[in-house]
Amino acid sequence: MTLRPPPSRRVGPVTRTDIVRFAGAGGDFNPLHHDPEAARRAGFDDVIAMGQFQAGVLAGFLTDWVGVENLRSLEVRFVAPVRLGDTIEVSAKVGSAESGVTQISLTASAGPTIVVTAEASVADPSS
Amino acid sequence: MILLVRPKEVKVAGIPIGGIVDVVEFTVEAGKIREFARATFTEDPRHLTRELATATHSVVTGHYRDQRDFVARLGLAIERIVVGSVSWQYSRPLLAGDRLVATRRVEADLVRESKRGPMRLVTLATEFVDQGGETALVQREVLIERPSA
């Protein structure tokens, strides 16, 4: 099977509501992600998204395409923070395939800034 | 950014390698699957109708943990921590109704020199074991404690 990546996915502009919704979904109540004063004390202008938010957006883009049951591994590296108003764009490149498992590289960017990079291995649905 | 000086095991306050950080028992809930899918803009309709969890659903264990407590027990300064990376290895996807026991252990605890001083890197590995005693997935996260100013 040859995987062909779908068009990139754009999510945003990221709102305070998006961040709070994810906090409620995942249970991350670090004030950095909902309290502007806490964010300022940490050196940011306002709250930032938690890394797991952009990881979840990236993973959703991937599994909507390949099927979550075929995902064998996913490794996500957090490169830069996602701020309010950022639009996240996620895209994928298909790498090598061996023994029914395909390697996929993913990137999430906010404008010109890469915020997350990821590597995934995906099993051929027929294997 | 990171100078790759030979890493070394640290002897600082914390939990020894292989030591348990915390254990969480929880049930994968259909409503939480939908909530998490919506919060991550995940569109596969099976998250709504067939109760198949999203890839990073294991993150919901945050609801059962005390972030400040485990960070303190690891001997880390919470205001200097960033999460460098997270990975998941899957045996199967999670389904609504799964009863899971998630045991989180310290897998590595290293110090690396950087331009601004020593940085501590703590790797935590969480094994999610299902009601049949099988490992459904393993999640790893690398916590980075930045140098103190």
Image (spheres, helix red, strand yellow):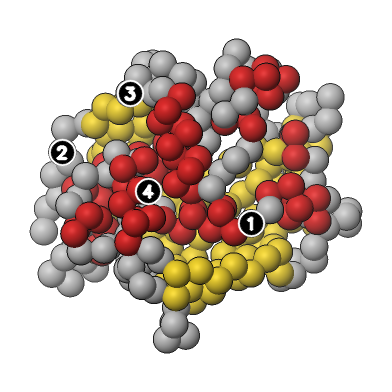
Residue bearing mark 2: A6
Answer with the quarter of the image where residue A39 lies.
Answer: top right
Are the residues under marks 2 and 1 on the same chain? no
Q: Chain of mark 3?
A: A
Rendered residue at 83%/30% (across/down): B148
Answer with the quarter of the image where residue A33 lies.
Answer: top right
Amino acid tagged 1? Arg
Q: Chain of mark 4?
A: B
Are the residues under marks 4 and 2 on the same chain? no
Tag 1–tag 3 contact (CB < 8 Å): no
Alpha carbon separation for disc pair 1 and 3: 29 Å
Alpha carbon separation for disc pair 4 and 1: 18 Å
Vertical placement of residue A74 versus B91, above or below: above
Q: Which mark is residue B36?
A: 4
Residue bearing mark 3: A12
Q: Is residue A44 left or right of residue B145?
A: left
**Percent position of residue A127, x then y:** 17, 72
Residue bearing mark 1: B65
Amino acid tagged 4? Phe
Rendered residue at 36%/72% (across/down): B97
Nearer mark to the viewer, of 4 and 3:
4
